[in-house]
Amino acid sequence: MSNHDEAFCAIIENKFSRIIAAISELHGISLEDAMEIFYNSETSTLIEEGVADLHCRSDKYLAEEVWQEMMVEKRLK
């Protein structure tokens, strides 16, 4: 793994933890529930893959995107 890859992984790991914390805070749920929602989202995969530089978006914005994604999936079930 190159230094660039290691740096990106560190940035993404920190980003993920901040998004999870934001989901928890914004919606009054536990960190465990927020983590489950986040890691089961398509958004988390897109961020990790570097699609559209999503990692550059604000943590709160991404937390809301993940939440909205989960709400849409619930309605479709």
Image (cartoon, rainbow, N blue to C red):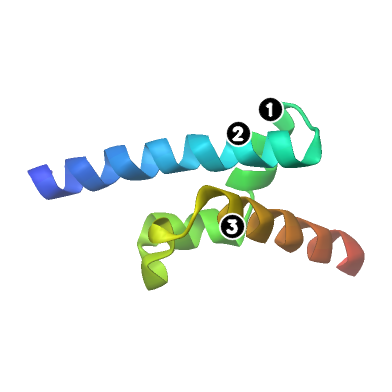
Query: Number of numbered discs present?
Result: 3
For disc 1, the marked residue is: 32
The residue positioned 37% from the left and 66% from the top of the image is 53
Q: Is residue 30 above or below residue 19?
A: above
- Residue 3: image location, x then y, percent: 9, 43
For disc 2, the marked residue is: 21
- Residue 41: image location, x then y, percent: 63, 55
How far apart are labels 2 and 3 at the CA level?
13 Å
How far apart are labels 2 and 1 at the CA level?
10 Å
* Residue 47 horizontal side relative to residue 42, left or right: left
Q: Is residue 61 above or below residue 34?
A: below
Q: Nearer the viewer, mark 2 or mark 1?
A: 2
What amino acid is found at the position of numbered circle 3 in the picture?
Tyr
Tell which residue pokes out farthest to the bottom in this image: 52
- Residue 70: image location, x then y, percent: 76, 56
Q: Secondary structure at mark 2?
A: helix
Position of the C terminus by quadrant: bottom right
Q: Which of the marked residues, 2 or 1, is nearer the chain's N terminus? A: 2
How far apart are labels 1 and 3 at the CA level?
20 Å
What amino acid is found at the position of numbered circle 2 in the picture?
Ala
What amino acid is found at the position of numbered circle 1 in the picture?
Glu
Estimate how packed mark 3 is, as few (under 14), some (14 to 19) or many (20 or more) residues with alpha carbons within 10 Å. Answer: some
